[in-house]
Image (cartoon, rainbow, N blue to C red):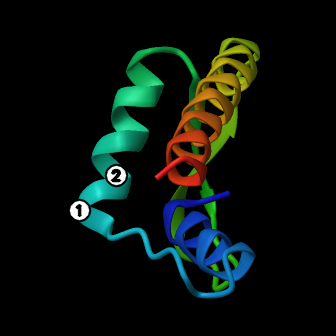
Amino acid sequence: MHGYGITLHIQMLSNEVLRVEEGSLYPALHRMAQDGWIKAEWGASENNRRARFYRLTTAGRKQLAEEEKSWARLTQAVASVLQHA
């Protein structure tokens, strides 16, 4: 998926609650590419414009699984604190 498509996809999946600004998205994509978590390739977008398309690598899928575990621990901890407030 290309950068703008990623932004729209996040907005759609979150029912318009989450919005990722270009100033945050592209530096994050660049860092993830440097870390080997995603691979970027040039291609043509839906409207036939040149765009970079990103996909997760094997290392990226592994990192995603770790981030999901970390997020689950964090949200569980916050829920526990809120239940006992």
Residue pictured at 73% horizontal, 74% vertical: 13
Q: Assess whether mark 1 and mark 2 are in contact (beta carbons under 8 angstroms).
A: yes
Badge 2 marks a residue whose secondary structure is helix
Q: Relative to 47, does residue 18 appear above or below in the rendering? A: above
Q: Which residue is mark 2?
A: 26
Residue pictured at 51% horizontal, 71% vertical: 4
Q: Which residue is mark 1?
A: 23
Indicate the position of residue 23 as horizontal and vertical percent values.
Answer: 23, 62
- Mark 1 belongs to which amino acid? Gly
Residue 22 left/right relative to 44: left
Q: CA distance from mark 2 to mark 1?
A: 6 Å
Indicate the position of residue 44 as horizontal and vertical percent values.
Answer: 64, 65
Residue 53 left/right relative to 51: right
Badge 1 marks a residue whose secondary structure is helix
Residue pictured at 59% horizontal, 87% vertical: 16
Badge 1 crowding class, 10 Å Cα cut-off, few under 14, some 14 to 19, many 20 or more, is: few
Residue pictured at 51% horizontal, 65% vertical: 50
Residue 41 left/right relative to 22: right
- Mark 2 belongs to which amino acid? Tyr
Q: In this view, which residue lies farthest toward the front? A: 84
Residue 72, image quadrant: top right
Q: Relative to 24, does residue 41 appear above or below in the rendering? A: above
Quadrant in which the N terminus appears: bottom right
Q: In this view, which residue lies farthest toward the left? A: 23
Residue closest to the eye, 70 or 63? 70
Badge 2 crowding class, 10 Å Cα cut-off, few under 14, some 14 to 19, many 20 or more, is: some
Indicate the position of residue 35 as horizontal and vertical percent values.
Answer: 44, 15
